[in-house]
Image (tube, coloured by chain):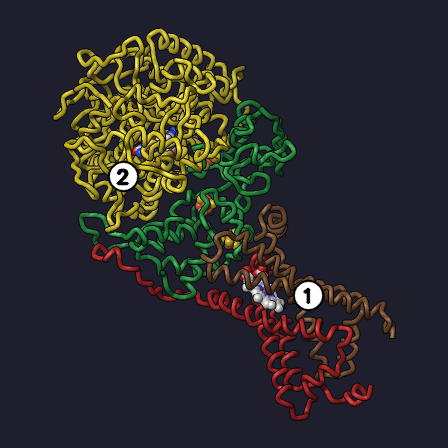
Amino acid sequence: MAQYHQFDAIVVGAGGAGLMAALYASRSVNTAVISKLYPTRSHTGAAQGGISAALGNLEPDKWEWHAYDTVKGSDFLADQDAVDILCREAIDAVIDLEHMGLPFDRTPDGKISQRRFGGHTNNETKKPVMRACHAADRTGHMILQTLYQQCIKNNVKFFDEFQVIDVLVENNVCNGVVAVCLATGETHVFQAKATMIATGGFGKMWRISSNAHSLTGDLPAALLRRGLPLQDMEFYQFHPTGIYKMGILLSEAARGEGAVFINNKGERFMERYAPTMKDLASRDVCSRSIYQEVRAGNGIDGKDYVYLEFRPEVVNRYFQADGNPRRVDAAYMEKRLPDIIDFVRVYMGIDPITQPVPIQPTAHYAMGGIPTDLDTRVLADEKGTIVEGLYAAGEVACVSVHGANRLGTNSLVDLVVYGKRGGIRMAEYAKQASLRPVKQDAHKMGEAVLSAIRDNPGRERPSSLRRDLQTLMDQDVGVFRTGAGLEDAIDRIKALQERYKDIHIDDKGLQFNTDLMEAWELGCLLDLAEVTAFSALSRTESRGAHYREDFPNRDDQNFLKHSVVWKNGGLRVAYKPVRLGRYAPTERKY
Amino acid sequence: MTTMNPSAPRPARPIPQGRNRFERAMWLFMRFSGLALLFLALSHFGFQHIIVGTHQLTSEDTIVRWGLAGESITLAQLFWRLYYGVMVLLAMLHGLNGLRQVAYDYLKNKVVYNVFMAAAAALILAATALGVIALIVGVNASGAAEALAR
Amino acid sequence: MIKVHLKIKRFNPEKDKKPWWGEYDVEVEPTDRVLDALHEVKWNIDGTLALRRSCAHGVCGSDAMRINGRNRLACHRLIRDEIQNGQITIEPLLGLRVIKDLIVDMEPFFAHYRSIMPYLVNDTDPGPRERLQSPEDRARFDDTTKCILCAACTTSCPSFWARGEYVGPAAIVQAHRFIFDSRDQGAAERLEVLGDSNGVWRCRTVFNCTEACPRGIEVTKAIGEVKQAIASGKVR
Amino acid sequence: MSALISTVRASLTYRGREGHWLWLLHRVSGLGVLLFLILHVIGMSSAFVSLEIHDRLLEMYKTPPFAIGELALAFGLIFHAVNGTRIAILELKPELWQKQQLATRLAIVIVALLAAPTIIIMALGSINAFFGPGAGH
Ligand SMILES: Cc1cc2nc3c(=O)[nH]c(=O)nc-3n(C[C@H](O)[C@H](O)[C@H](O)COP(=O)(O)OP(=O)(O)OC[C@H]3O[C@@H](n4cnc5c(N)ncnc54)[C@H](O)[C@@H]3O)c2cc1C
Ligand code: HEM
Ligand code: SF4
Ligand code: F3S
Ligand code: FES
């Protein structure tokens, strides 16, 4: 027996995007947040570097410059009207966060402090600009905490540790979601006029990943099963500096302070790949360069990693070689990069002040996701048909502001700007719409999937399937891709999907059956992996994070467009044009 | 708040006292009585047990320090009576409140807690009363002669 | 790879009357996290083992548990630092009801968190730009902004074990973050809550909380500052 | 009752550091000293009733069981006093102590410095009284 709840608006996911939406929606309509984690556990809390907004607190800046940098970073695939909204509204959103109590670091005169970040420039001088607002190196943590605090203040209703397993969409109308209460194992049906999906990324389809264990793409997979498409799934960002074998992220800030990549010959190899920006080239470029070194046999010990050097003497040596008068010492590094240095000490047991740090690119951020319009309304196809009552924002959504490659700090901007926009739009919509009836057996489809897993007497362990999936994704749907590799990957994913039908789990109980939920999440990852590989196979060009060795060049003639992929029955791709604006595509050099 | 001068040192902001002043008072009392006891109890202990030594203790010492009941007392005896009086009062109240804190931790049943604390408070206050009476009255003279004779 | 003998306190409410010790042998790298060893058990030996986890690098606060007798995040401790005679003992947090295996009921913990008004209180109009705050005023409460609400501190506190009514160090840390924020005006109300019988006075300065905090927050110091604010009637 | 047992068990099995054990000892010593104090005050106040009773009680202090109890009392009182002072200082000046370990170690050293000679002197006194030349009179 399912339990029923009714709300004007529900938000699935309690990360930055979800909480921002909930906060704004709850100001005028009855709103609930459903999250499979306690809100403060959301992965937004892991974000370190900062949130960009052209406040101009320390030096001149304009939101138009921010917009241009974003478009260039996206390799011109971003929709420029969406980027304009992002960068213009970022300013108010950041001020809004400050008013909510976010403890930003301060300038000497008491304003929000800002710092430089990769790819953010003064368009006139072409020099890096101080645009990233930050709270030490815990900006995401503070955003998440602040938004949660405000939700408590405003008595937003939370359903913590409720995992959504199905979205009630039929004929392009959404009536709510179906969720499992993890503590009891009971099914709950949430009926709502407006439903927002803000469930974050899905980087757990790769083995080396900066993403949390919980980022398994449950909701995008649920939408696929309900016949809705996903957009730009081939664009997945690999961050160059993950801790070797673990994937834990070491922020770009390290290289901002002078850290460099070194191969087994002791060379600073980025000089060859990006002569101007060198180690501070964009993320896609650095990740590719690292793997090119590995392929050339220049990985450390012949393995698939290189060193990130932040030993002061090494950093200073390269400052000198570059004619840069700056010098650093151990104390300075400790002060500027406390968390990162701590991560290296705790997880690698080495001291980055005296030893080089083994790093490798790590799966980090999904540029693609659920297609939406500028008001975060979910789109059912490439023509722009709207799914009534369904919204999406945050990393899970694709408006698209990040195009083929996201700029550092822009995800947090995306969360608050489009989260807020979505919340406001949902409330407006919910005020004039009426609650649509849901079928008595609405929960059956989701429940059936779960009980099929629970009762399956099969032979396969979900964990071995997951390992196989992650290994093949690392190999063939990673930084480098080829047509043959992707075709092979799709075949192997399909084989895994077959094996998935033969899984068994140990836990047959109801309460906190994490065995069951993990197995279900694996099913979601398999579906998303298939769509990702298929989208990548369909795009026969290289752009941003998507690099095809067999098509190494950008092809604006044929591919200045977004992919939209369905997976009902078979896989199907359609395309829609990029919305250009002020900035015409040019070659992207760093 | 926007008009503040951010570089000016921040003045201490006064906070109105809350409704529950008892726990605050007790917290302060524990610390100040503790500080007093640090000197009183340790000096008493050191005097009796180290300088004099338990095995040298006799009731003469008691008489010398307290004075006899019904007789006028010297300044020194007044000092000792006050010294012991303050110490007994502080130690007993300090101990009683300490016991209350411990009991609050472990006796979660309200009735049990109340009964226990009532009994403990009765015992401790009775003992304190006895001690204070003894200090006011002084040593009972009857039998004092034999004691002095020995 | 080394062999580790894991002793895990298990309890499944649907099956067990009493908790029991599950014993498992796994092979892991010495530099793996304790969390990896638990996953090794869950994924390859006994899928019924229940625990919370998410970020796996000590920033989300999901997996606080008792490792070798002390509150730790499973993802923040390496095998080689915890292994003792080839063994690691793992138990759920103390002082909160065990729901299943290593999962405890967090509701009382969050109820205490909510009780201290964990949000900025300031009803004045901030105007179109940010409120100003000097770097020194910002630094005043920096330490307590790091809290990830993992509950390692509160569940290491003897006063909390004795009585769940005690608001606990985590809630005090969160209150401290606002009380000492120059932009906030709700200190009086918060101190009212914290000055009550189950507030800061229940802290016996045991330091277990400080020692348990995975974020290195000086918890006892923060509590001391709150006590002083109430005792002296001033926030500085 | 089971709550009491589980609380006490938690206190005894949690692997806290110095602060945890000092807290336990502070509690036990405080209660112990309180128990002694009650008996002691009642005993001493007998003086206002009759010196004879008072005298007999003083003699009782000189028997071996009391001598041993006295050693425990000495340690308990000294420990409780020093540790109580440590707690009070830490609360009044939290910024004085970057690391609690320093404070606890210091407290332990001071307790040792005070308690060791006290206990030795008292023990020697008792040994002398029981076994020394004047023993048994
Ligand atoms: C290590 C790291 C560092 C980063 N640093 C930066 C940075 O400096 N700047 C920047 O701009 N970006 C950064 N990013 C990216 C950015 O943090 C994320 O993209 C962003 O936080 C995503 O937020 P979100 O609100 O979309 O989702 P999340 O914060 O991931 O939240 C997802 C929510 O959805 C819920 N959920 C998921 N599935 C379900 C389900 N089935 N049912 C119910 N609830 C569900 C979860 O419980 C959670 O509450 C970083 C990312 C990582 C991994
Ligand atoms: C000698 C100097 C003494 C000092 C400096 C001192 C100090 C303290 C302090 C500061 C506390 C509060 C501890 C806390 O809140 O955690 C305390 C508690 C206590 N004291 Fe004392 N005290 C002294 C003597 C005594 C004496 C003589 C007694 C016995 C009557 C006593 C019995 C107690 C008890 C029972 C507690 C409660 C312990 C607990 O809550 O765990 N103390 N003491
Ligand atoms: S203060 Fe530290 S231990 Fe306590 S909840 Fe916060 S992060 Fe966890
Ligand atoms: S452990 Fe508890 S007693 Fe105080 S110092 Fe920490 S809250
Ligand atoms: S899993 Fe996030 S803190 Fe351990």
Q: Which amino acid does label 2 sit on?
A: Arg
- Seen as rendered, the residue at the extreme left is A582
Residue A98 visible? The answer is: yes
Indicate the secondary structure of the residue bearing disc 2: strand
Shown in yellow, the chain is A
Q: Identify the residue shown where x is 56% and y is 43%.
A: C70
Where does label 2 land, which residue?
Answer: A115
Q: In which quarter of the image is the C terminus of chain A?
A: top left
Above or below, comparing residue A572 to residue D131 in the picture:
above
Q: Chain D is shown in which shade?
A: brown
User: Is residue A199 visible to the viewer in this orientation of the structure?
Assistant: no
Instruction: In this rendered view, identify the residue nearer to me: A183 or B145.
Output: B145
Q: Residues within 10 Å of mark 2 (few under 14, many from 20)?
A: some
Instruction: Name the residue: 76% across, 64% down.
Output: D68
Kindly indicate the quadrant of the structure image that contains residue A401.
top left
Query: With respect to residue A137, does A577 lie above or below?
Result: above
The hue of chain B in the figure is: red
Q: In this view, does C10 lie to the left or right of A41?
A: right
Does residue C29 appear left or right of residue A393 in this picture?
A: right
Q: Residue at point 31% right, 33% down?
A: A256
Q: Which chain carries label 2?
A: A
Q: What amino acid is at disc 1?
A: Ala
Q: Which mark is residue B113?
A: none
Q: Chain C is drawn in which colour?
A: green
The image position of residue A144, as x and y in percent, is: 34, 40
Given the image, what chain letter belongs to the residue carrying mark 1?
D
